[in-house]
Amino acid sequence: MVGAPAAGRRPGGPRLGYLGESFGGGLGALALPWDDRFGAAQLTVPTFGNHPLRLTLPCTGSGEAVRAYHREHPEVADVLRYFDAATAATRLELPTLVAAALFDPAVPPPGQFAVYNALAGERELQVLSAGHFPYRGMVAEAAELDEGRTAFFARHLGRA
């Protein structure tokens, strides 16, 4: 959580910003539609997006364990519908900055972009070259995301 400085808060407005990466990004998309304490969110490489597609995409993250379980218990697909970050994002009306990756061995990129595309409220996208994977230019992209995130929260939560 990111708190806005007291002097910059909008009177009576939500004062917290949510920052979630990977698992935290997916959980943010799932939980934030029902939590009015937050005024803005930033989700980096959010997981749990578009389970029907995730079940078809090999990965190194928790999605692979879900795929293995699904092979033995295909009926789990019915339950996964209730835990889909992209579905929940259709109710997420907070201003949200999503940093989604073009390549990610742990969280399949189509699920990350599904969360972004489903957002109901104001949204911004920063495309990363990769997630959960070291690459040339990673430090510069991380600095750019940090700068963008700081400006995003300042715009939506206020600052001193």
Image (cartoon, grey):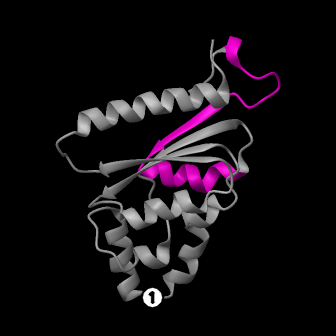
Q: Position of residue 18 (x, y in %)?
A: 57, 38
The residue carrying mark 1 is 74
Crowding near pointer 1: few (<14 within 10 Å), some, many (20+)? few
Say if 151 sits above or below 22 in the image: above
Q: Quadrant of residue 109?
A: bottom left
Is 160 drawn above or below residue 156 in the view shown? above
Q: Quadrant of the N terminus?
A: top right
Image location of residue 93, percent across then percent down: 70, 50
Give the side of residue 84 with respect to residue 35, left or right. Answer: left
Q: Residue 45 versus residue 116: which sits nearer the camera?
A: 116
Residue numbers of the magenta segment? 6-33
Q: Position of residue 40 (x, y in %)?
A: 63, 38
Residue nearest the viewer, comparing 113 with 85: 113
The correct choice, above or below, for 68 with respect to 133 in the image is below
Report helix, strand or loop for mark 1: loop
**Is 19 contained in the magenta span?**
yes
Residue at 56% over, 49% down: 28
Q: Amino acid at mark 1?
A: Pro
Q: Residue at x 66, y 22 (%)?
A: 158
Q: Is residue 41 left or right of residue 104?
A: right
Outermost residue on the right side: it is: 12
x 58%, y 30%: residue:
153
The answer to if 84 sits in the magenta stretch is no
Q: Is residue 89 visible?
A: yes
| Residue for point 37% across, 68% down | 63
Classify the position of the C terminus by image quarter: top right
Residue 15 sits above or below residue 100 on the image: above
Horizontal side of residue 45 vs 91, given as left or right: left
Q: Position of residue 118 (x, y in %)?
A: 60, 62
